[in-house]
Image: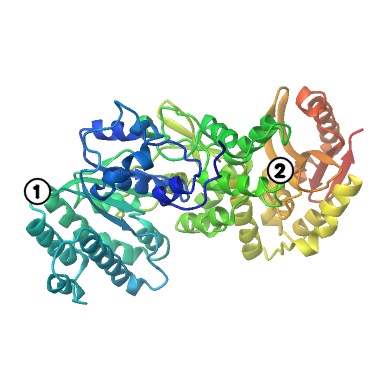
Amino acid sequence: MKKQIPSKTSNYAELIREQAYYIDKTKFIGLLEQLSDNYLFFLRPRRFGKSLLISMLEHYYGIQYNDQFEELFGNYYIGQPGNTTALRNSYYILSFNFSGIKTEDSGRIESEFNSEVYNVIINFLNDYDIGTETEKDIFRNPDFSSPELLRNFFTIFSKYRPSGKVYILIDEYDHFTNDLFSFNQEHFQEVVSRNGWVRKFYETIKIYTGKGIVSRFFATGVTPVTLDSMTSGFNIGLNITLDIDFHNLAGFTEAELKELILGTIYEEGKFDLDKLLGDMRAWFNGSRFSRRGGEKLYNPQLVLSFLSAFHKDYTYPEEITDNNVTSDWKKISNILSKLPKADRDYIIEHVYVEEAIEGGLSTQFNLEMPYRRADAISVLFYNGLLTIDKEEYGIIRFVIPNYVIKTIYWEYLRAVYEMEQNISFDLSEKARIFKQMASEGKIDYLVEEVSKIMEPLKDNDFQNFRESNLKMIVISILSLNRIFIIDSEREISNGRLDLLLTRYDAYDSKYQFLIEFKYLKMKDESKYEQIKNEGIAQLQRYRSSEEIKRLENLKCYLVLFSKKKIGEAFLIQ
């Protein structure tokens, strides 16, 4: 029987009861228990399935769900004979979710945090029927800090459940501190310092692990920026983020994605499954979190949002992306803003044009040291904006995971151009470019628009101007509209393409484009004809490849720009 595409709920029991398809992550429960460490941290980008993972662990280990075990887990790996562990339904669950803490007013963050801790504790005492109303009233003291709330909680718990064991689950442990790290580093250092309240909160948890009350601990987050400072007060935690054994503890493999489609929306003859998987692979696949390899992973929310829209009439939605995942280009800005401009430009040019950058991976951040290029690259990685391609000789090659993440960089660069160069990127103003390309197969308006942007640049701007800068301007314009899938630096059998624009099925472009760029510095103006002929030969070679021959209504253009001859386009017949 077909199941539903999962909704965006992060409640495991709700998902199972609504007969939604669940990608089975219960096989990792036994592996987690086999670790010698009981206190674990696991980092993944936003919307990567961390909250559902936390909920699944809560329902497996919570004593209150004992009589629901068969209903919730009977159809999954952990519910099969021989797979269930001895720790099943044996813990009192204290589960925190810090993702809702507002960070706009840094002065209120601690009170927001205290409020979350208070609410969780009161709900715990009520759910497990622990303590008198008088004892619960103690927690209503507005002056209590989160460590004081915890100490009072553990005192009452030990009184009523002296042999009970607590499993602490924390979702998005670093949500608010990540925002502080980006916007207010001075306040960030205050809250995680030796006397900071965040550190004292975790120090209190550590005390009660030593007393045997807190038996297990599992926390998710996005970056280790807070982890280094915090765990100096909670130095019993193990970070399993880069461990290949837990690589797909969150996220979907391609096999899991195919299972999901076959188990939910697939009907013979309704759509081409291979084509759908191929397109989704390019758009959503690509995340890898271990130096030792591991299969590339899909972001679950991107996949589920797309499939939900696709299932309505088996046509691609107008928007590939999910704005809940990709709407905040400012995240890139925040990560890069603390770097010197030269380092910012270095990262963006490599990531934007070459779509790859090499470096190391920081697992800890020393806030007493200057924020470096390597730190920024690492933070981009933890946020899912870069991923591990491979490691050789201790050097990691980072790449953009997939097409959707590329669109975030394009949005960021448009914002940079608008602020720094006073360039306007407005789709209503650029509409004629896309109409001409889609209906006539011409790029005259595109070249004209790029020429306008380049014309006011000063001589010193041109001194360091390269083909890569030219391509960045072109992509910034083209990415305003979703009519084309933009493929930069694509490897084919006989070379690497500057720019390939293929039609997106949701739109009605008649034409597709292969564009080669050449930019001549002033000293090379005399070689104009030579460089033009070389570019034409390149395009003719690319066009002869089997990958390119398959593209219908393909227009091939050589585009030359120089200081004197601002822009010319040549159609290669």
Q: Residue at 55% of width from left, 39% of height from top?
A: 401
Q: Residues within 10 Å of mark 1 (few under 14, many from 20)?
A: few
Disc 1 is placed on an element classified as loop
Quadrant of image for the C terminus:
top right
Q: Amino acid at mark 2?
A: Tyr
Q: Which residue is mark 2?
A: 314
Q: Is residue 222 visible?
A: no
Marks 1 and 2 sit apart, C-alpha to C-alpha, by: 55 Å
Contact between labelled residues 2 and 1, with CB atoms less than 8 Å apart: no
Q: Relative to residue 100, is residue 138 depicted above or below? A: below
Q: Residue furthest bottom?
A: 142
Quarter residue 88 falls in? top left
Disc 2 is placed on an element classified as loop
Percent of width and height locating residue 539: 81, 31
Quarter residue 323 falls in? bottom right
Residue 472, numbered label: none
Query: Of the residues under marks 1 and 2, which one precedes in the sequence?
Result: 1
Q: Which residue is mark 1?
A: 163
On the rendered structure, is 382 left or right of 193?
A: right
Percent of width and height locating residue 302: 56, 47
> 225 or 345, which is in the foreground?
225
Q: Amino acid at mark 1?
A: Ser
> 431 or 391, which is in the foreground?
431
Q: Residue at 65% of width from left, 57% of height from top?
A: 414
Q: Relative to residue 570, is residue 184 depicted above or below? A: below
Percent of width and height locating residue 561: 80, 46
On the rendered structure, is 130 left or right of 360?
A: left
> 316 or 314, which is in the foreground?
314
Percent of width and height locating residue 202: 21, 55
Q: Is residue 178 visible?
A: yes
Q: Residues within 10 Å of mark 2 (few under 14, many from 20)?
A: some
> 162 or 456, which is in the foreground?
162
